[in-house]
Amino acid sequence: MRRFAVSCRATRRWTSCFPTVFRRYSFIVETLVKFRYRALPQRDKGSIRAYMMKMIGKSESQVTRLIRQYLDTGRVRDRRGAQAHAFRRRSTKADIGLLALRGRRGA
């Protein structure tokens, strides 16, 4: 693990190997459990952190936040809330239907 992290230092940050956020977060939890992150000495924790930074393509602070979330709650999840409400529509569905009808007539 340590050799992997050292060999990757010279390269630029990779793009993530995992296409979805869910898969990325699952990888983090699996890695932390597999290597028993809580019980590791500090220098080994640094190697695990560097490995995860390279594999998921996130910065040190982002990986630290995700690890902290796992240590505090036992899971890693997307903490962003629901999306804000969209702008209010000016046109009703009836208006859109009339425009479509008018477009079909060629006017």
Image: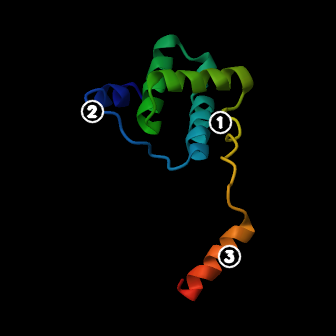
Q: Which residue is mark 2?
A: 11
Asked which secondary structure carries label 2, the reply is: loop
Q: Name which of mark 1 and mark 3 comes first in the sequence.
A: 1
x and y, in percent, of residue 103 in the image = 57, 80
Disc 1 residue type?
Asp
Disc 3 residue type?
Leu
Residue displayed at 44% across by 46% down = 17
x and y, in percent, of residue 70 in the image = 66, 26
- Asked if the residues shown at circle 3 and circle 2 are in contact, with their CB atoms under 8 angstroms apart, the answer is no
* Distance from the alpha carbon under mark 3 to that under mark 2: 58 Å
Q: 55 or 37, which lies in front?
A: 55
* Distance from the alpha carbon under mark 1 to that under mark 3: 42 Å
Residue displayed at 74% across by 70% down = 94
Asked which secondary structure carries label 1, the reply is: loop
In front: label 1 or label 2: 1
* Distance from the alpha carbon under mark 1 to that under mark 2: 28 Å
Q: Which residue is mark 1?
A: 78
Q: Quadrant of residue 79?
A: top right
Q: 28 or 93, which lies in front?
A: 93
For residue 96, the mark is none
x and y, in percent, of residue 81 in the image = 70, 35
Is residue 72 shown left or right of residue 31? right
In the rendered view, would you say 65 is above or below 100? above
Q: Which residue is mark 3?
A: 98
Residue displayed at 53% across by 86% down = 106
In front: label 1 or label 3: 3
Q: Quadrant of residue 99?
A: bottom right
Q: Crowding near pointer 1: few (<14 within 10 Å), some, many (20+)?
A: few
